[in-house]
Every structure is written in C-alpha cells, then in structure tokens.
C-alpha cells in the first residue's frame, strides 16, 4: 500500500492553512474557485501543504514542472542568471535567449531560415501563431473539436469548449472547428481560403485524446496541397512529456509552426513560437508582434537548464518506462470502473465508467495524491518526468481504494440531491 501521511499534524498547522485560504478569498479573484490546499514547499515529485500534509504530485503544475520541485540544477541556473543579469527589454539581445533559440531549432531539426519568437505562456505562444496565420492574408483558420489552446482572445477563438468561449464573444472571427480525427471532414474543409490548421497531437484538456493514427500525416498532406499552414500546439505535449522531445515527431511530420510553453522552463514562465523555414518565419515583420518579458535571461536560463537535465538524465526514456508502468498497472487492476487509459508517455488519462473524475480527484487528494479531472469521466496524470517506478506503483496500489471511495461518494451525493 502507498504511504499516506496525515494531512493535519497539529492544531497550529491546521489553523495556518485555513488562515491562508481566508486571506486568499479576500484578495484573489475567484476565477479558480476555492483552492484545494495551500502548498508551501516541494521536493522532487512531492509537495507539502501548510498543514503538514505530503502529496505525490501527479499533475506537476499541469504538465509544467517536468523536473519536479526544487531541482538543484534548475534552481542553480536561475539563481546564477538572476545574480548576473535579470531582465532587459527586447531592444537588446542576451546570450541565454540566443542559445535557447538555437537549442530549440536543433531539437526540432528545423530547416534553414527557421526562427523562434519567445513569449511567456502557451496562450501567448498560440496568439503568436494566430497572428502568423493572419499574415497569410487568408480568412479562415481551422481547429478541432475538443481543442484547448488558451484563454486569451485569439487562443480562445481556437479553443472549442463553449463554456470558455461564450462569455467573451464576439471572439476574433474566421475560426471553424472540425470533428476530431475525421480526415474526410478535414479534406472537405481545406481549400485556398484556409490560412492554417491548428491542432494538438494529444488533446489534454479535451480528455487526453491522441489523434488517430494517420491523421497528422493526412493533415500535413492536405494543408500542403492547398498552401495552408500546419500549426502544432505542443504546449502540453512538448519537452519530453510523451517520451519524445516533441509529440509530432513520432508521426514523421514537419509542421510549419510549433508552439511551446509549460515544461519548457521547468516551472519558470516561458513560451515559444517556432516558425519553420524563412517563408513562415518572415510573416511577422519588425514591429508586428512583441512582448516585454518574452525570452528574458532568467527564463531562458531556466529553459536551457531544463533541456540539459532532460538530456543528461535520459528523462525521455524514464518517461516512456514509467508511463508504461503506470498505464499497465492501472489496466492490470481490471477495475470495472476504469474503461481505458489513454495518452502517451507521462500524459495519461484514466477514463472512468460511470463519470467519477471529480470524486476520484477528491478522494486521491485526501489520500495524498494530486490528480486532475479534465472531463467528468477522465482523470489526467501529468507528473514530473523524474517520477520513479516506486512512486508510480504507490499510486497504482492505492487506486482500488480510491475508486471505491469515489463510487461511494458519488452514490451519496446523488442520494442527497434526490432527497
């Protein structure tokens, strides 16, 4: 069985968490609802809350803390850079910024003439890709049903979920959403008026759904035939998350634009737009896009350190190995409540029947595991890439009890509603 530490160790510590939550409610906009816990420190794949509870972090800041928490190489790189040169505007260049751009172009095997634009987040990276598509002069941009590309207005226009979109309409126009994984629908939609097709290789927020085999290759063939851009959103899947540096490379496809963020900085905010080839890289000219903080020396140093550790410690292999162990372990339980384990590497979705995702997430938190309910029937696992086999096993061992508790909680809640 997994080791579960008590979530409350003393009356003083218990009051500490409650006090912080009270202050949070009085000072922070309620866009995220009530926080589940107040976290105060982390180490490796674990975090601790203000009341002394320890949790195995199987979410990693939503697929962001790829090296876990307080990794010495990352903290050392950030500290050293901040002590040398912190922030400068983009009127000036810095060594870390240039070195990081070169490293990304190399990892992506980008052709001659390719270039990088640095942003601060995935949404901003996708805004940049949106603007590149606009610069083609064509009026239509295609995305997929179930897509999530961010919450700024351009990224939100690409996002499919009505609950996210409708409160902020009218959104930037010209975006159409096609059925997920339907090559025939894609082929019928693309013509000379389409600027770009924007897609995720694995939809994280959409339920951890991988594109069907052959879809990405077909998308490349169809967009190329009509002169449209293929934009691959690797914000969540990039930087080793699926067991490869980038998820699209397993499909043998060369896109026109790749967007990155999340894991790129190991927890320090940074995003990137990578434009492949000179024709695409020059669509945004001088003065047509910008950011104050994008590619700053500290964030760039963090990203370089993150890439270095992934390579040095062979975390791509660890991701494949531990991801397979998690998947196989969950399936081996043969629980009637688990219908599927989807995803790739350490981006996995446990599909539940009936839809118990919220109840399972709550039960797991009480037992010392951080998960994420992305849909009513899917729980997402996106742990640090440093997750060990033993840590993965501790979650699998606890899962039968957590599923039983979630099922009981759902039955009780339904009875309360009907009473």
Image (tube, helix red, strand yellow):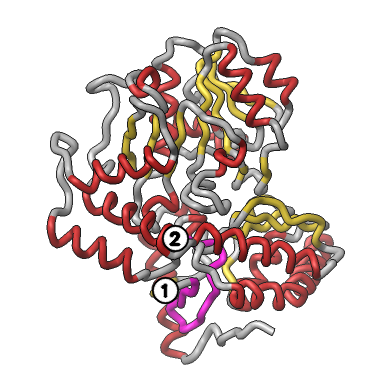
Q: According to the image, label 1 marks what residue?
A: 42
Q: How many marks?
A: 2
Q: Is residue 40 above or below residue 116?
A: below
Q: Is residue 352 above or below residue 108?
A: below
Region in magenta: 45-60
Q: Does residue 221 appear anywhere in the picture?
A: yes
State yes or no: residue 327 in magenta.
no
| Image quadrant occupied by the C terminus | bottom right
Q: Position of residue 379 (x, y in %)?
A: 67, 58
Q: Is residue 78 above or below residue 97?
A: below
Residue at position x 68%, y 44% from top?
209
- In-front residue for pair 107/195: 107
Q: Position of residue 71 (x, y in %)?
A: 37, 69
Residue at position x 70%, y 73% from top?
396
Q: Is residue 8 above or below residue 80?
A: below
Q: Quadrant of residue 388?
A: bottom right
Q: Residues within 10 Å of mark 1 (few under 14, many from 20)?
A: some
Residue at position x 48%, y 62% from top?
314
**For marks 2 and 1 on the same chain, the one whose residue lies earlier in the sequence:** 1
| Image quadrant occupied by the N terminus | bottom right
């Amino acid at each position: 069985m997994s080791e579960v530490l008590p979530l409350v160790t003393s009356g003083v510590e218990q009051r500490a968490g409650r006090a912080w939550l009270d202050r949070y409610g009085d000072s922070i906009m309620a866009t995220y609802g009530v926080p589940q816990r107040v976290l105060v420190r982390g180490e490796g794949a674990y975090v601790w809350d203000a009341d002394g509870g320890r949790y195995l972090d199987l979410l990693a800041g939503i697929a962001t803390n790829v090296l876990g928490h307080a990794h010495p190489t990352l903290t050392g790189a950030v500290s050293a850079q901040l002590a040398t040169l912190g922030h400068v505007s983009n009127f000036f260049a810095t060594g870390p910024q240039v070195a990081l751009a070169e490293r990304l172009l190399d990892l992506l095997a980008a052709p001659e003439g390719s270039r990088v634009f640095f942003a601060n987040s995935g949404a901003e990276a996708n805004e940049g890709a949106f603007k590149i598509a606009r610069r083609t002069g064509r009026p239509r941009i295609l995305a997929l049903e179930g897509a999530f590309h961010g919450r700024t207005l351009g990224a939100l226009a690409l996002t499919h979920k009505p609950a996210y979109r409708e409160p902020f309409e009218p959104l930037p126009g010209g975006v159409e959403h096609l059925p997920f994984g339907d090559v025939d629908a894609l082929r019928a939609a693309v013509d000379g008026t389409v600027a770009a097709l924007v897609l995720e290789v694995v939809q994280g927020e959409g339920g951890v759904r991988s594109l069907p085999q052959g879809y990405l290759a077909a998308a490349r063939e169809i967009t190329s035939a009509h002169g449209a851009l293929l934009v691959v959103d690797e914000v969540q899947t990039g930087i080793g998350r699926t067991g490869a540096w980038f998820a699209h490379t397993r499909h043998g496809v060369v896109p026109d634009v790749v967007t990155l963020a999340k894991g790129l900085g190991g927890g320090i905010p940074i995003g990137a737009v990578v434009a492949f080839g000179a024709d695409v890289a020059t669509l945004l000219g001088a003065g047509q896009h910008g950011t104050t903080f994008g590619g700053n020396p500290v964030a760039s140093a963090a990203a370089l350190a993150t890439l270095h550790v992934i390579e040095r410690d062979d975390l791509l292999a660890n991701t494949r190995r531990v991801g397979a162990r998690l998947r196989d372990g969950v399936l081996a339980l043969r629980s009637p409540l688990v219908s599927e384990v989807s995803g790739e590497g350490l981006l996995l979705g446990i599909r539940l029947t009936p839809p118990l995702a919220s109840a399972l997430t709550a039960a797991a938190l009480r037992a010392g595991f951080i998960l994420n309910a992305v849909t009513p029937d899917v729980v997402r696992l996106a742990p640090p890439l440093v997750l060990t086999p033993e840590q993965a096993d501790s979650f699998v061992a606890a899962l039968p009890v957590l599923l039983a508790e979630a099922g009981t909680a759902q039955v009780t809640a339904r009875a309360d509603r009907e009473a």
